[in-house]
Structure formats: structure tokens, C-alpha cells
Amino acid sequence: MIKVIINYQDEQIISFSAEGHAGLGAKGNDICCAGVSSVCQTALLGLLEFLEPKPVYKITSGYLKCELPQQLKAEETTKAQLILNTMKLGLLAMQNEYGDHVSIILRR
């Protein structure tokens, strides 16, 4: 099972992590793992491209964690929230389709 945790402070996403494997297919050929990985990594790439200061992140096999910097200006915060909420929409859609293999946890 893939577990994605999206952490909030007030009403804003401040970090997310994804870990595990879906077990839907063979390693390297699992559409669910590939989908979750693509959505999370694309969100990270967007944050790295459009934010200053950059988020702090860690990626290893089957694990990704990303934390927003604490001192973002209002414009940077807006960009980050657009990217992260779009990520959340994609992940929730995958959970609806592959609920036995991916779990999205929203921590407020």
C-alpha cells in the first residue's frame, strides 16, 4: 500500500510525504505506483521551479518527503498552494480508483 500524508497548518498545505508500494503489479510495471510517483514528483518539480526559497525534500526508493520553507512571501505561498492542491486532487482521484492500493491522509 502506498500511503501519502498531506500536512496542513491552518488551511494551507505545508508538507507531504509518500511511501510504500502499491503491489498492483511487478516492481517497475505498477501503474498505481507510477501514477502516485509522477504526481508527487511533478508537484515537487513545480515547487522547485517556482518558489524562492526552495522547499526541503528527500527522495529514496519508495519514499518522497517535501516541506515548504517557513518564510514564504504571499505570492510564493499562493503558487505553492496552487501546485500542492492540484497534486492533492490528482492523488485523491487515484485513491478513488485504486483505494485498495493507495491511501491519502489529510492531517489538519
Image (spheres, rainbow, N blue to C red):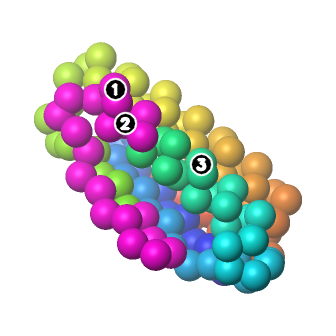
CB of mark 2 within 8 Å of CB of mark 1?
A: yes
- Percent x, y for residue 57? 29, 56
Quadrant in the picture for residue 73: top left
> 22 or 78: which is nearer to us?
22
Amino acid type at circle 2 is Leu
- Percent x, y for residue 92? 70, 52
Determine which residue is flagged by label 1.
50
For marks 2 and 3 on the same chain, the one whose residue lies earlier in the sequence? 3
Residue that appears at 81% across and 57% down: 96
Determine which residue is flagged by label 2.
47
- Percent x, y for residue 89? 66, 42
For marks 3 and 1 on the same chain, the one whose residue lies earlier in the sequence? 3
Residue situated furthest right in the rendering = 97
Q: CA distance from mark 2 to mark 1?
A: 5 Å
Q: Which element type, helix, strand or loop, lies under badge 3?
A: helix
Q: Which residues are magenta?
A: 45-64
